[in-house]
Image (cartoon, coloured by chain):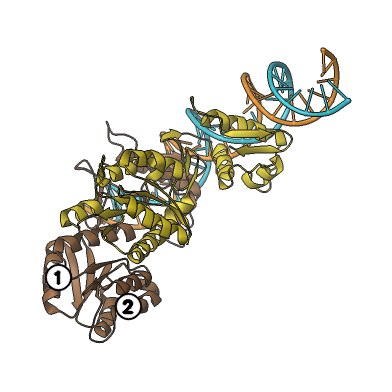
Chain colours: A yellow, B brown, C cyan, D orange
DNA sequence: TTAATTTGTAACAAAATTGTAACATTTAAA
DNA sequence: TTTAAATGTTACAATTTTGTTACAAATTAA
């Protein structure tokens, strides 16, 4: 079992217990003790699942959840809500606000584990494979859209395929031949220089102002994301 | 809210309570008092969701659940398990054996309702309602009518099927091949360009004045709602 | 039956995308 | 520094893709 799990919870003892046990089970885990930090950290951490406490010192779990759903790159992030006393109205609000499941404290770790498994099983087939993420970039294969920090970036077909290709292995340097083979239809013959031009076009679209360069040129080798 | 719900539960009082309330909320409900009957009735009833008691006179809920999963037509049937005392080991087994959620008796009807909504929303966005909605658009499958902001829009048969198809997954980009397969009868052969013309017709009908474009063209990929 | 509607395709128009050449700039080696 | 190779940049014509219209055939309703 693996995946990235983020926890927003203000009781350190719970964090410690859960985090330790999840890591023992092969998950990569990170956490925040309050809502505002959590929202920031989330983007960096890029989790596959979020454990969210209902009562937090600053924002309520519901508010965080709604906030998250607005963010394009977290539209489909599964959320399990942790509620303190299991007041019924709360539970319902939680489920209606886009929470995938909830758990009433105190809970056993086994129970939590079962819920996580169930939620990941349901949500993974869609989100994990269909959204490619790297840094602040997100490519949605289903909707054929690309965002950088929530701002949509319009790409032409070849630019899109090119970026999609790089995103399957970001950081890896691809030669022009490799790029040609994977991004262009099998039979066509195009000059290797053509790639340079498309890279240029992709750069132009993707490099919004105030953003760092996203495509690296490796002289005499090829290109990669960075 | 509508959909078909089947209940397998040996306590008549619970059946009565749940069935009555679900029907009041627009669901079509049927039930059985034991596992073997239930399995038979299921096929006839073709539910969208199953409420399954953990302890039954003949088969256990788990056994029924495993049985159901073997049947191809019920592989994806969402199941909510009703457990009597909430013994933890049981819960875990339940979730691992393909149950989508569970509820510990005694439960309130509101809580049950929230769970049902959540599970149906996840598993089968279509069956939850026969009305497909997206933005200010509404398609009534029963009456075969389409409205935009309460104003009825008259569509030809193909336009209707086309829109219905898009509405099952709005925002998702479909290729012309996918559209052909899903919207046209299986055997017919029509040119891919034909779709473009129908899209144009659908656009013309659906794009009332003062309204934003509803159909997005994704060059070299296909179309989607937006 | 006739009339009306729906349907698929062809033909042309408009728009977007693509590949390449030509020239500019950068980089690394001599 | 000079030089050659590699890459960046720009412009543009050719090609591809999509939009639009018209129309005849097919289907349905009257």
In x, y percent, where is residue B150? Answer: 19, 42
Q: Is residue A75 above or below residue A193?
A: below
Q: Is residue D12 above or below residue B193?
A: above
In x, y percent, where is residue A44? Answer: 45, 41
Nearer to us in this view, A19 or B48: A19
* Residue at the image position 33 percent from the left and 80 percent from the top: B63
**Same chain? Circles 1 and 2:** yes
Label 2, secondary structure: give it.
helix
* Residue at the image position 11 percent from the left and 69 percent from the top: B20
In x, y percent, where is residue D28? Answer: 30, 57
Label 1, secondary structure: give it.
helix
Return the residue at label 1.
B19
C12 relative to B110 in the view: left or right: right
Q: Quadrant of the C terminus of chain A?
A: top right
In x, y percent, where is residue B151? Answer: 20, 41
* Residue at the image position 39 percent from the left and 41 percent from the top: A72
Nearer to us in this view, A4 or A175: A4
Instruction: Categorize mark 2 by other alpha carbons within 10 Å: few (<14), some (14-19), many (20+).
Output: many
Residue A108 visible somewhere in the drawing:
yes
**Closer to the eye: label 1 or 2:** 2
Please identify the quarter of the rendering in which residue A179 is found: top right
Kindly give the residue lying farthest to the front in the view shown: A13
Return the residue at label 2.
B62
Instruction: Categorize mark 1 by other alpha carbons within 10 Å: few (<14), some (14-19), many (20+).
Output: many
Q: Chain of mark 2?
A: B
């Amino acid at each position: 079992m693996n995946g990235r799990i983020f926890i927003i919870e203000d009781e350190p003892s719970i964090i410690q217990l859960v985090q330790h046990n999840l890591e023992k089970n092969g998950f990569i885990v990170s956490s925040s003790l309050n809502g505002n930090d959590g929202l920031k950290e989330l983007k960096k951490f890029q989790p596959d699942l979020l454990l969210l406490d209902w009562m937090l010192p600053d924002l309520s779990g519901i508010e965080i959840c709604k906030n998250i759903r607005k963010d394009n790159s977290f539209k489909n992030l599964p959320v399990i809500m942790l509620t303190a006393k299991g007041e019924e109205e709360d539970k319902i609000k939680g489920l209606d606000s886009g929470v995938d499941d909830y758990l009433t404290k105190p809970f056993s770790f086994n129970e939590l584990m079962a819920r996580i498994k169930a939620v990941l099983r349901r949500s993974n087939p869609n989100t994990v494979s269909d959204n490619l993420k790297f840094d602040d970039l997100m490519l949605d294969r289903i909707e054929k859209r690309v965002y950088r920090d929530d701002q949509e970036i319009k790409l032409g077909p070849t630019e899109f395929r090119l970026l999609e290709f790089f995103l399957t292995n970001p950081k890896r340097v691809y030669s022009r031949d490799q790029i040609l083979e994977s991004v262009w239809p099998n039979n066509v013959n195009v000059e290797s220089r053509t790639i340079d031009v498309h890279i240029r076009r992709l750069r132009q679209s993707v490099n919004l102002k105030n953003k760092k360069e996203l495509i690296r040129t490796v002289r005499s080798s090829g290109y990669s994301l960075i």
